[in-house]
């Protein structure tokens, strides 16, 4: 549960960053945002693995695991999309 709160906090910070700092164009700020998103991605992957382990050890029923897995994977996809948008255009 704590991991979920950390990931949510990271996402809120990243999403609200442009509102707090205005438009960011310098490479250092972009690099920082990329690092935050990479951390959020890794945290989300850990959550997915933890949920799978909880299911395999009997802590989660299959319907609960499937619902949680679907939600976590959708959140991971959103983080990946945000990372893709940060990539420089050729």
Image: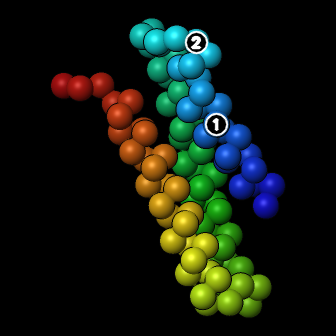
Foreground of the two, 71 or 86: 71
Outermost right residue: 2
Residue 28 visible in rendering: no
- 60 relative position to 76: left or right: right
Quarter of the image holding residue 85? top left
- Identify the residue at image location x=55%, y=66%: 71
Which element is circle 2 on? helix
Foreground of the two, 29 or 13: 13
In the displayed structure, 48 sits above or below 61; it is above
Residue to which mark 2 is pinned: 21
Residue to which mark 1 is pinned: 12
- Identify the residue at image location x=67%, y=46%: 8
- Identify the residue at image location x=56%, y=72%: 69
In the displayed structure, 17 sits above or below 58; it is above
In the displayed structure, 17 sits above or below 70; it is above
Say the numbered circle drawn on residue 71.
Answer: none
- 18 relative position to 4: left or right: left
Quarter of the image holding residue 61? bottom right
Total labels: the figure holds 2
Q: CA distance from mark 2 to mark 1?
A: 14 Å
Where residue 46 sits in the image (x, y, percent)?
63, 60
- 44 relative position to 78: left or right: right
Foreground of the two, 13 or 40: 13
Residue 88 visible in rendering: yes
Where residue 87 sits in the image (x, y, percent)?
34, 30
Which element is circle 1 on? helix
- 17 relative position to 23: left or right: right
Crowd band around label 1 with a 10 angstrom C-alpha radius: few (<14), some (14–19), many (20+): few
């Amino acid at each position: 549960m704590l991991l979920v709160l950390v990931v949510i906090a990271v996402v809120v910070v990243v999403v609200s960053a442009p509102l707090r700092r205005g438009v960011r164009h310098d490479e250092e700020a972009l690099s920082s945002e990329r690092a935050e998103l990479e951390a959020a991605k890794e945290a989300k992957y850990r959550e997915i693995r933890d949920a799978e382990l909880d299911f395999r050890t009997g802590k989660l029923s299959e319907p609960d695991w499937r619902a949680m897995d679907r939600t976590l994977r959708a959140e991971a996809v959103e983080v990946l999309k945000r990372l893709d948008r940060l990539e420089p255009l050729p």
